[in-house]
Amino acid sequence: MDFAISEKMKVIVQMIDEFVENELIPLEPEFINSDFSEMLPALREKQAMVKQMELWAPGFPADCGGMGLNLVELGLVSEALGRTPLGHFVFWCQAPDAGNVEILHMYGSGEQKEQYLKPLVRGDIRSCFSMTEVDMPGSNPVMLETTAVKEGGDYVINGHKWYTTAADGSEFAIVMAVTDPAAPVYLQASMIIVPTDTPGFNLVRNIPIMGHEGDDYASHAEILYQSCRVPQKNLLGPEGQGFAIAQERLGPGRIHHCMRWLGVCRRAFDLMCARANERVISPDGKRLGTRQMVRQWIADSAAEIQAARLMTLHAAWRIDNEGAKTARDDISMIKYMVANTMQRVVDRAIQVYGGLGMTDDTILAYFYRHERAARIYDGADEVHKMSVAKRILRSYEGKTVR
């Protein structure tokens, strides 16, 4: 792997860093203390600036209006944007829209691309991804109760979903539902596009997360599908290929998440170091950074962030060059490695800030409550570890080790 960053990417990352610092971080107090919908006019102004800078939709394919960056390049961008919770939304490379764009681009029909993909990339609409179910284990995506039954020329969908991120205000959902319960387990489910104004699509509530319900894009919804009828032409890709398409979506998606988490690490680390240098802790003027424990936290954090970053960029490079299937162990390892690194770094930063770290006067408390889920979604840590260990042990079967 070549660790050199092209001049083009150096310029892009520098431009993003400056934009985040000057335009987005100053908006964070309002973001933390207001409804997201109240901020939309200000965020739309920032998005217009991003378009003028020609940095809109960095990870989306160029042939549908994005910048067309590869996964390593997008990783560098995602790291820079991850320093603020507003970064990915303002530059229009946020989940779940990013994953939905990928699968619409790969599997969407011409009509689906015209109706859903193009306006999604332009930022005219938002979307959501409806897979996780209330009574089924999210760690096993082949276990679904939601069904889509053919009736005439339609699918009739019934089921109960939750953690449908950003459903509030979305134009359409991509729904995972069982279309053939008699098929082999990995061929039972399909993906179907459901406009959110369809009768039977019921947004029950935005689920409170660590005490914060959220709204609009910054929310996670509970959805009840009750005899929700859509045309069979809304099938996305071949019938029975929902699980395979989901795997295509999740591999690159984990790169996006991990590099965003590294942006969180970078912000928390910067805040921790600044606090350690500035905070006076004794009458003789000694600073917090003179304490051995604090220095150990800083040294450990620096090493852990660097290790996690290199692992993630290497995984992105392998996906770009060898494909997601070849890189599946790398993808699983970064998922739990980076999530836990982020948790430790944010926790240490809060500890250095003391009581101030528990308040919303810094961004740290927001990171702490909203990023705890990193060890759960897209496959719980324990599931990834079991899968990696199983494949590693299988590779040693029949080998003589001296």
Image: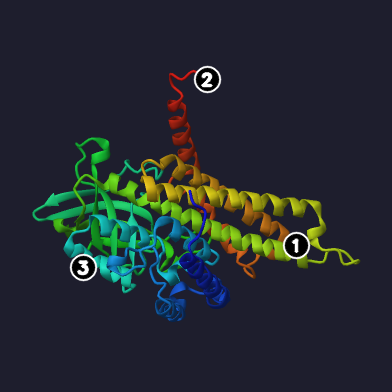
Q: Quadrant of the C terminus?
A: top right
Q: Give the x, y percent position of residue 29.
A: 58, 74
Residue at the disc numbered 1: 276
| Residue 199 as seen in the image, left or right of residue 380 | left
Q: Is residue 333 above or below residue 63?
A: above
Disc 1 + disc 2, Cβ < 8 Å: no
Where is residue 111, by image quadrant?
bottom left
Disc 1 + disc 3, Cβ < 8 Å: no
In depth, the one of 290 and 355 nearer the eye is 290
- Residues at marks 1 and 3, CA–CA distance in whole angstroms: 53 Å
Q: Nearer the viewer, mark 2 or mark 3?
A: 2
Farthest residue, direction right: 284
Q: Give the x, y percent position of residue 398.
A: 43, 18
Residue at the disc numbered 2: 401
Q: Earlier in the sequence, mark 2 or mark 3?
A: 3
Numbered disc 1: secondary structure = helix
- Residues at marks 1 and 2, CA–CA distance in whole angstroms: 48 Å
Residue at the disc numbered 3: 114
Q: Give the x, y percent position of residue 292.
A: 80, 52
Q: Nearer the viewer, mark 1 or mark 2?
A: 2
Q: 10 Å neighbourhood of mark 2: few (<14), some, or many (≥20)?
A: few
Q: Which residue does the image show at 30% across and 44% down from the upper left?
A: 144
| Residue 185 as seen in the image, left or right of residue 358 | left
In depth, the one of 217 and 251 nearer the eye is 251
Q: 10 Å neighbourhood of mark 3: few (<14), some, or many (≥20)?
A: few
Numbered disc 2: secondary structure = loop
